[in-house]
Amino acid sequence: RHGSGQQRCATFTYKTGMDEAHQRELAIIQGLAPGLERGELSLVYQPKMALADANVHQVEALARWLHPELGPIAPDEFIQLAERSGQIRLVTEWVVGQITRDLAQWREEGLDLGVAINLSADEIAQTALEQTLAPLFQAVGEAESITLEVTESALLREPENALQNLRALQARGARISVDDFGTGYSSLAQLKQLAPDELKIDKAFICDLADTPADQFIVDLIIDLGHKLGLEVVAEGIENASAWRYLSRKGVDLMQGYFLARPMPAGDVADWFADHQANHARWLDRAVDRK
Ligand code: C2E
Ligand code: MG
Ligand code: MG
Ligand code: MG
């Protein structure tokens, strides 16, 4: 994976033989439904901060799986296997249910939060999508928002169904975000067709931003493209002050990454917000660094 130029961020890979890899895949595929049943999966939430006012209106839900024998399984691994084995809808239904419970808890704690949910390319074209997401639309209040993070590949397989689905969801008030922008297989014509509300620059371009001129050119181009198309531009994977400074100078709209906050359990979100409020002046200072 190294040398592909897309996996330089902190990550880990498995080195296993074929048999072992195959057995692991089987265990994951077969363990998913019972794992959901037994409460082995959970959600963590990562804030997205608006550069304009240093406020956080939205958190992104990210799935976690703690397997009793295999230990933690990364979503990059199990989501793909869930897709391949026809179980992705099961996962998304669970994610939606968990988010609605967490939204209710946050409301009790006085937090009105929008949520971003990741959708697999596979399920964008499925007719059941709107039905799967229905409880989420019921759970968010007037002030909050739903963002659906989809990858560029969303339109590859069944573009007509996918577009119809996304238009219907946008009509119900959801924002569409193109996740991992710049690393997928798509054309600019497809981006135009997709007509999203948000572009999310992939973290592969962000993690070494300050030291990598090529990344800077690409990031500048994406920001410019997004803004000229009238979209909000988000940077994910901001790990350090130098990348933060660069992106704020360039006027990225929403900032996300370990530098602001790591993904956290729902129960920690209220404390994190109190802390962010307490340090609001400092974040605002950093935000207007661009001037
Ligand atoms: P993504 O949606 O692009 O999420 C960004 C990933 O980068 C997350 O990894 C997040 O934890 C990580 N990240 C955030 N800030 C930083 C940072 O500053 N530095 C670095 N190095 N990484 C950062 P995670 O949670 O392992 O998720 C991986 C991918 O799995 C996600 O990429 C998303 O495509 C997918 N995924 C996660 N949860 C779900 C889900 O509920 N449904 C679906 N369909 N996909 C999901
Ligand atoms: Mg995402
Ligand atoms: Mg991403
Ligand atoms: Mg990703």
Image: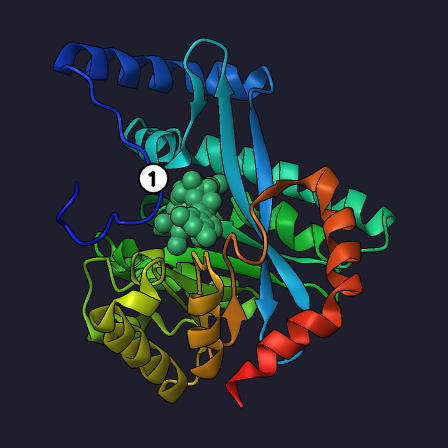
Image quadrant occupied by the N terminus: top left
Q: In the picture shown, does residue 68 fall above or below 183?
A: above
- Neighbour tally class for label 1: few under 14, some 14-19, many 20 plus, Cα within 10 Å: few
- Please give the name of the residue rendered at 33% of the width and 31% of the height, measured from the top-left corner: 77
At which x and y percent is residue 20? 21, 11
Look at the image and name its color scheme. rainbow
Which residue position holds label 1?
A: 11
> Horizontal placement of 69 versus 182: left or right?
right
* Mark 1 C-beta to ligand 1 under 8 Å: yes
Residue 222 in which image quadrant: bottom left
On the rendered structure, is 12 left or right of 107?
left
Q: In what quadrant of the picture does the C terminus appear? A: bottom right
Horizontal arrangement in the rendering, residue 3 relative to residue 88 (left or right): left
Considering only vertical position in the picture, is 130 above or below 276? above
Regarding residue 119, the answer to whether it shows in the image is no
Residue located at (79% from left, 42% from top): 105
Which amino acid type corresponds to the residue marked 1 in the rendered image? Thr
Residue at 51% of width from left, 42% of height from top? 62
- Where does residue 131 sit, x and y in percent of width and height? 54, 46
Residue 269 coordinates in the image, percent (x, y): 72, 47
Please tell me how many numbered marks the rendered image carries: 1
Residue 100 in picture, x, y percent from top left: 69, 43
Q: Is residue 180 above or below residue 122?
A: below
Judging from the image, what secondary structure is the residue with disc 1 in? loop
The answer to whether 90 is drawn above or below residue 150 in the figure is above
